Image: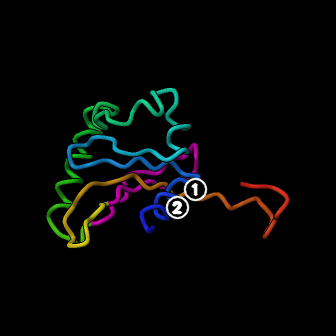
Amino acid sequence: MLNKMMKSVIDQDRASIVICDLKHTIVYMNPAAISNYEKRGGLSLIGKNLLDCHNSDSSEMIIKIVEWFKEDIKNNMIYTYHNEKDNKDVYMVALRDDDGTLIGYYEKHEYRNAETAAFYDFTKSL
């Protein structure tokens, strides 16, 4: 039951969520990611190597970050950049098993724009 709930949390997020294993294989993309990366292949990116989607400098940093995640169970999130156009901060986040073993990672987007919807507006969905 919890797995279904967690998948629903990820799927309802308006920010792109791309989950990768330790071989950098894209194992899951939420609907926002599929839509946002449509020009790069969208759903067809699942199963592909994330490093193939980045330039060599970015790929090198992704590899370094994953190695840093492995060094210490406390190394779980790192700030990677600010996207001025979308006014968001971007982080890489470690995914760990119950015993703390690193099992993958994802990119977390935190938008800085204030919400424009009215509180408790039942007349429209976001």
Which disc is residue 9 wearing?
2
Side of 113 relative to 69 (left or right):
right
> Which residue corresponds to the image point at 33% horizontal and 63% vertical from the top-left?
77
Viewer-proximal residue among 101 and 37: 101
Residue with the mark numbered 1: 12
Viewer-proximal residue among 36 and 8: 8
Q: Is residue 89 magenta?
A: yes
Dominant SS type (magenta): strand
Side of 112 relative to 116 (left or right):
left
Q: Amino acid at mark 1?
A: Gln
- Residue 11's spot in the image, x, y percent? 53, 53
Side of 78 relative to 29 (left or right):
left
Viewer-proximal residue among 112 and 4: 4
Quadrant housing the N terminus: bottom left
Q: Amino acid at mark 2?
A: Val
- Residue 60's spot in the image, x, y percent? 22, 41
Alpha-carbon neighbours of circle 2 within 10 Å: few (<14), some, or many (≥20)? few
Viewer-proximal residue among 17 and 83: 17
Residue 26, compared with residue 118, is above or below; it is above
